Amino acid sequence: MTGHGSGKNEERDRLRGHRVKQHIEHRIRKEDRKAELVPIKTVWGEAKAWETLAGLRPKDVCAGAMADYDEASRAYSVRSFGIDFIISPDARTITSSDPRSGLFLDRYKDFFRLSILYYLASAKDIPATGRLIRPLDVKGGQRFFSGTHVLPLDQIAERFGRDKVSFVALGLKFGAEIAAFGDAAVRLYPLPRVPVTIILYLHDDEYPSRVTLFFDSTVDFQLPLSDIVWSVAMMASLVMGE
Protein backbone atom coordinates (compact mmCIF):
# COMPACT_ATOMS: atom_id res chain seq x y z
CA MET A 1 0.00 0.00 0.00
CA THR A 2 1.27 3.49 -0.82
CA GLY A 3 1.86 6.09 1.83
CA HIS A 4 -1.02 8.15 0.42
CA GLY A 5 -3.40 5.17 0.66
CA SER A 6 -2.25 4.39 4.18
CA GLY A 7 -2.89 7.99 5.22
CA LYS A 8 -6.43 7.86 3.83
CA ASN A 9 -7.11 4.65 5.72
CA GLU A 10 -5.80 6.12 8.97
CA GLU A 11 -8.01 9.19 8.58
CA ARG A 12 -11.03 6.99 7.79
CA ASP A 13 -10.40 4.89 10.90
CA ARG A 14 -9.99 7.97 13.09
CA LEU A 15 -13.27 9.44 11.82
CA ARG A 16 -15.04 6.13 12.30
CA GLY A 17 -13.69 5.90 15.86
CA HIS A 18 -14.76 9.47 16.63
CA ARG A 19 -18.29 8.76 15.40
CA VAL A 20 -18.65 5.65 17.53
CA LYS A 21 -17.31 7.48 20.60
CA GLN A 22 -19.98 10.16 20.14
CA HIS A 23 -22.63 7.48 19.65
CA ILE A 24 -21.60 5.58 22.79
CA GLU A 25 -21.58 8.75 24.87
CA HIS A 26 -25.07 9.57 23.60
CA ARG A 27 -26.28 6.10 24.62
CA ILE A 28 -24.72 6.48 28.07
CA ARG A 29 -26.45 9.85 28.57
CA LYS A 30 -29.75 8.30 27.49
CA GLU A 31 -29.43 5.38 29.90
CA ASP A 32 -28.43 7.67 32.77
CA ARG A 33 -31.44 9.89 32.17
CA LYS A 34 -33.65 6.81 32.44
CA ALA A 35 -32.06 5.83 35.75
CA GLU A 36 -32.03 9.29 37.36
CA LEU A 37 -34.36 9.63 40.35
CA VAL A 38 -33.21 13.10 41.38
CA PRO A 39 -31.43 15.80 39.40
CA ILE A 40 -27.68 15.30 39.67
CA LYS A 41 -24.64 16.54 37.83
CA THR A 42 -23.27 13.65 35.74
CA VAL A 43 -20.29 13.35 33.44
CA TRP A 44 -20.42 11.14 30.39
CA GLY A 45 -18.45 8.71 28.30
CA GLU A 46 -14.81 8.32 29.16
CA ALA A 47 -15.01 10.61 32.18
CA LYS A 48 -17.88 8.55 33.58
CA ALA A 49 -15.88 5.35 33.06
CA TRP A 50 -12.90 6.80 34.92
CA GLU A 51 -15.14 7.83 37.81
CA THR A 52 -16.71 4.39 38.01
CA LEU A 53 -13.35 2.65 37.92
CA ALA A 54 -11.88 4.92 40.60
CA GLY A 55 -14.73 3.98 42.95
CA LEU A 56 -14.14 0.21 42.72
CA ARG A 57 -11.94 -1.93 44.95
CA PRO A 58 -8.78 -3.01 43.06
CA LYS A 59 -9.22 -6.56 44.36
CA ASP A 60 -12.64 -6.80 42.72
CA VAL A 61 -11.47 -5.20 39.48
CA CYS A 62 -8.54 -7.59 39.17
CA ALA A 63 -10.68 -10.65 39.85
CA GLY A 64 -13.29 -9.64 37.31
CA ALA A 65 -11.04 -8.32 34.55
CA MET A 66 -8.00 -10.63 34.93
CA ALA A 67 -5.93 -7.50 35.57
CA ASP A 68 -3.00 -6.76 37.88
CA TYR A 69 -2.74 -3.84 40.30
CA ASP A 70 0.36 -2.05 41.53
CA GLU A 71 -0.14 -0.56 44.99
CA ALA A 72 2.76 1.87 44.65
CA SER A 73 1.56 3.50 41.44
CA ARG A 74 -2.14 2.79 42.08
CA ALA A 75 -2.43 1.62 38.49
CA TYR A 76 -3.81 -1.44 36.71
CA SER A 77 -2.05 -3.54 34.09
CA VAL A 78 -4.19 -5.21 31.42
CA ARG A 79 -3.15 -7.21 28.37
CA SER A 80 -4.91 -6.32 25.12
CA PHE A 81 -3.98 -7.77 21.73
CA GLY A 82 -0.85 -9.23 23.32
CA ILE A 83 0.24 -5.80 24.59
CA ASP A 84 0.49 -4.75 28.24
CA PHE A 85 -1.24 -1.44 28.99
CA ILE A 86 -1.03 0.57 32.21
CA ILE A 87 -4.26 2.25 33.30
CA SER A 88 -3.98 4.90 36.01
CA PRO A 89 -7.33 6.04 37.47
CA ASP A 90 -5.59 8.81 39.42
CA ALA A 91 -3.88 10.35 36.38
CA ARG A 92 -6.60 9.16 33.98
CA THR A 93 -3.98 7.89 31.58
CA ILE A 94 -3.53 4.74 29.50
CA THR A 95 0.07 4.05 28.49
CA SER A 96 2.35 1.30 27.22
CA SER A 97 6.02 0.92 26.40
CA ASP A 98 5.28 -1.60 23.65
CA PRO A 99 5.93 -0.16 20.17
CA ARG A 100 2.74 -1.82 18.89
CA SER A 101 0.63 0.15 21.35
CA GLY A 102 0.53 3.30 19.22
CA LEU A 103 -2.02 1.63 16.95
CA PHE A 104 -4.49 1.55 19.86
CA LEU A 105 -3.47 4.68 21.75
CA ASP A 106 -3.62 6.83 18.62
CA ARG A 107 -5.27 5.44 15.51
CA TYR A 108 -7.94 3.36 17.26
CA LYS A 109 -8.06 5.34 20.49
CA ASP A 110 -11.78 6.15 20.37
CA PHE A 111 -12.58 2.42 20.19
CA PHE A 112 -9.85 1.34 22.58
CA ARG A 113 -10.06 3.74 25.51
CA LEU A 114 -13.79 3.36 26.15
CA SER A 115 -13.61 -0.41 25.65
CA ILE A 116 -10.80 -1.06 28.11
CA LEU A 117 -12.21 1.32 30.74
CA TYR A 118 -15.73 -0.10 30.67
CA TYR A 119 -14.30 -3.60 30.64
CA LEU A 120 -12.27 -2.92 33.79
CA ALA A 121 -15.31 -1.44 35.50
CA SER A 122 -17.73 -4.18 34.45
CA ALA A 123 -16.01 -7.52 33.76
CA LYS A 124 -17.10 -10.54 35.77
CA ASP A 125 -15.11 -13.47 37.14
CA ILE A 126 -16.78 -15.79 34.62
CA PRO A 127 -14.54 -17.97 32.44
CA ALA A 128 -15.08 -18.22 28.70
CA THR A 129 -17.15 -21.23 27.64
CA GLY A 130 -15.50 -21.76 24.27
CA ARG A 131 -18.96 -21.73 22.68
CA LEU A 132 -18.97 -19.32 19.75
CA ILE A 133 -21.84 -16.97 18.98
CA ARG A 134 -22.42 -14.70 16.01
CA PRO A 135 -22.53 -10.92 16.38
CA LEU A 136 -26.24 -11.16 15.52
CA ASP A 137 -26.76 -13.25 18.67
CA VAL A 138 -25.26 -10.60 20.95
CA LYS A 139 -27.66 -8.27 22.75
CA GLY A 140 -28.29 -5.44 20.30
CA GLY A 141 -26.45 -7.39 17.59
CA GLN A 142 -28.57 -6.02 14.75
CA ARG A 143 -26.34 -2.94 14.73
CA PHE A 144 -23.47 -5.04 13.31
CA PHE A 145 -25.27 -5.21 9.99
CA SER A 146 -26.36 -1.65 9.32
CA GLY A 147 -24.68 1.47 7.96
CA THR A 148 -21.31 2.43 9.40
CA HIS A 149 -21.57 -0.36 11.98
CA VAL A 150 -20.87 -3.07 9.38
CA LEU A 151 -17.58 -4.76 10.24
CA PRO A 152 -14.92 -4.56 7.49
CA LEU A 153 -14.57 -8.34 7.19
CA ASP A 154 -14.65 -8.19 3.39
CA GLN A 155 -11.36 -6.27 3.47
CA ILE A 156 -9.72 -9.09 5.42
CA ALA A 157 -11.09 -11.66 2.98
CA GLU A 158 -9.80 -9.65 0.02
CA ARG A 159 -6.35 -9.29 1.52
CA PHE A 160 -5.86 -12.85 2.73
CA GLY A 161 -8.18 -14.81 0.43
CA ARG A 162 -5.24 -16.70 -1.05
CA ASP A 163 -2.73 -16.36 1.80
CA LYS A 164 -3.68 -18.04 5.06
CA VAL A 165 -0.07 -18.08 6.26
CA SER A 166 0.09 -14.27 6.38
CA PHE A 167 -3.37 -14.16 7.96
CA VAL A 168 -2.25 -16.36 10.84
CA ALA A 169 1.08 -14.53 11.15
CA LEU A 170 -0.69 -11.20 11.57
CA GLY A 171 -2.93 -12.65 14.26
CA LEU A 172 0.07 -14.05 16.13
CA LYS A 173 1.73 -10.63 15.99
CA PHE A 174 -1.16 -9.32 18.08
CA GLY A 175 -1.20 -12.10 20.64
CA ALA A 176 -3.69 -14.43 18.97
CA GLU A 177 -4.00 -18.18 19.34
CA ILE A 178 -4.47 -20.43 16.33
CA ALA A 179 -7.96 -21.94 16.25
CA ALA A 180 -9.18 -24.99 14.31
CA PHE A 181 -11.91 -23.54 12.10
CA GLY A 182 -12.29 -22.92 8.37
CA ASP A 183 -9.14 -22.82 6.27
CA ALA A 184 -7.45 -20.76 8.98
CA ALA A 185 -8.60 -19.08 12.17
CA VAL A 186 -7.19 -16.97 14.97
CA ARG A 187 -8.54 -16.19 18.41
CA LEU A 188 -7.65 -12.64 19.39
CA TYR A 189 -7.86 -11.24 22.90
CA PRO A 190 -8.86 -7.58 22.68
CA LEU A 191 -9.53 -7.96 26.42
CA PRO A 192 -8.57 -10.88 28.65
CA ARG A 193 -12.12 -12.20 29.10
CA VAL A 194 -13.37 -11.19 25.65
CA PRO A 195 -11.91 -13.50 23.00
CA VAL A 196 -12.82 -12.79 19.38
CA THR A 197 -12.44 -15.59 16.84
CA ILE A 198 -11.92 -14.65 13.19
CA ILE A 199 -12.24 -17.43 10.61
CA LEU A 200 -10.88 -17.29 7.06
CA TYR A 201 -12.26 -19.32 4.15
CA LEU A 202 -9.92 -19.21 1.17
CA HIS A 203 -10.89 -18.42 -2.40
CA ASP A 204 -11.46 -21.49 -4.57
CA ASP A 205 -12.94 -22.32 -7.97
CA GLU A 206 -16.48 -22.34 -6.62
CA TYR A 207 -16.59 -19.67 -3.93
CA PRO A 208 -14.92 -16.33 -3.20
CA SER A 209 -12.95 -15.90 -0.01
CA ARG A 210 -14.88 -14.88 3.07
CA VAL A 211 -14.28 -14.09 6.73
CA THR A 212 -16.54 -14.56 9.73
CA LEU A 213 -16.25 -13.25 13.28
CA PHE A 214 -17.51 -14.82 16.51
CA PHE A 215 -17.60 -13.94 20.21
CA ASP A 216 -17.53 -16.26 23.17
CA SER A 217 -21.00 -16.85 24.58
CA THR A 218 -20.03 -14.93 27.76
CA VAL A 219 -19.43 -11.61 26.01
CA ASP A 220 -22.62 -9.97 27.30
CA PHE A 221 -21.51 -10.66 30.87
CA GLN A 222 -18.17 -8.94 30.34
CA LEU A 223 -19.15 -5.77 28.49
CA PRO A 224 -22.01 -3.52 29.63
CA LEU A 225 -23.15 -1.96 26.35
CA SER A 226 -23.70 -3.39 22.89
CA ASP A 227 -21.81 -0.36 21.54
CA ILE A 228 -18.74 -1.43 23.52
CA VAL A 229 -19.10 -4.98 22.17
CA TRP A 230 -19.23 -3.50 18.68
CA SER A 231 -16.14 -1.36 19.35
CA VAL A 232 -14.19 -4.46 20.39
CA ALA A 233 -15.29 -6.33 17.27
CA MET A 234 -14.36 -3.34 15.10
CA MET A 235 -10.89 -3.15 16.65
CA ALA A 236 -10.32 -6.87 16.05
CA SER A 237 -11.46 -6.50 12.44
CA LEU A 238 -9.30 -3.45 11.80
CA VAL A 239 -6.24 -5.08 13.36
CA MET A 240 -6.61 -8.08 11.04
CA GLY A 241 -6.90 -5.72 8.10
CA GLU A 242 -3.64 -3.92 8.92
Image (spheres, rainbow, N blue to C red):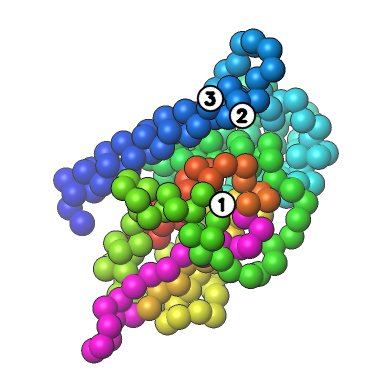
Q: Residue at x 29, y 62 (%)?
A: 155
Task: Tell me whether circle 1 and circle 2 mark residues in contact (CB < 8 Å).
Answer: no
Q: Secondary structure at mark 2?
A: helix
**Magenta segment: does it hold 115?**
no
Label number found at residue 50: none
One can see residue 115 in this view: yes
Q: Residue at x 25, y 88 (%)?
A: 206
The amino acid beneath tag 3 is: Arg
Q: Nearer the viewer, residue 222 or 106?
A: 222
Q: CA distance from mark 1 to mark 3?
A: 19 Å
Q: Is residue 226 left or right of residue 76?
A: left
> Circle 2 is placed at which residue position?
49
**Magenta segment: does it hold 217?**
yes
> Circle 1 is placed at which residue position?
139
The amino acid beneath tag 1 is: Lys
> Circle 3 is placed at which residue position?
29
Q: CA distance from mark 3 to mark 2?
A: 12 Å
**Which tag is nearer the camera, tag 1 or tag 2?**
1
Query: For mark 1, does the 10 Å Cα neighbourhood hold few (<14), some (14 to 19), or many (20 or more) residues?
Result: some
**Which tag is nearer the camera, tag 3 or tag 2?**
3
* Picture quadrant where residue 19 is located: top left
Q: Secondary structure at mark 3?
A: helix
Q: Is residue 166 left or right of residue 120?
A: left
Height in image: 7 above or below 179? above
Quarter of the image that includes the N terminus? bottom left
Q: Nearer the viewer, residue 130 or 141?
A: 141
Query: For mark 2, does the 10 Å Cα neighbourhood hold few (<14), some (14 to 19), or many (20 or more) residues?
Result: many
One can see residue 167 in this view: no
What residue span does the magenta drawing correspond to?
202-219
Residue 150's x, y, as percent?
A: 35, 53
* Picture quadrant where residue 160 is located: bottom left
Residue 173's x, y, as percent?
A: 47, 61
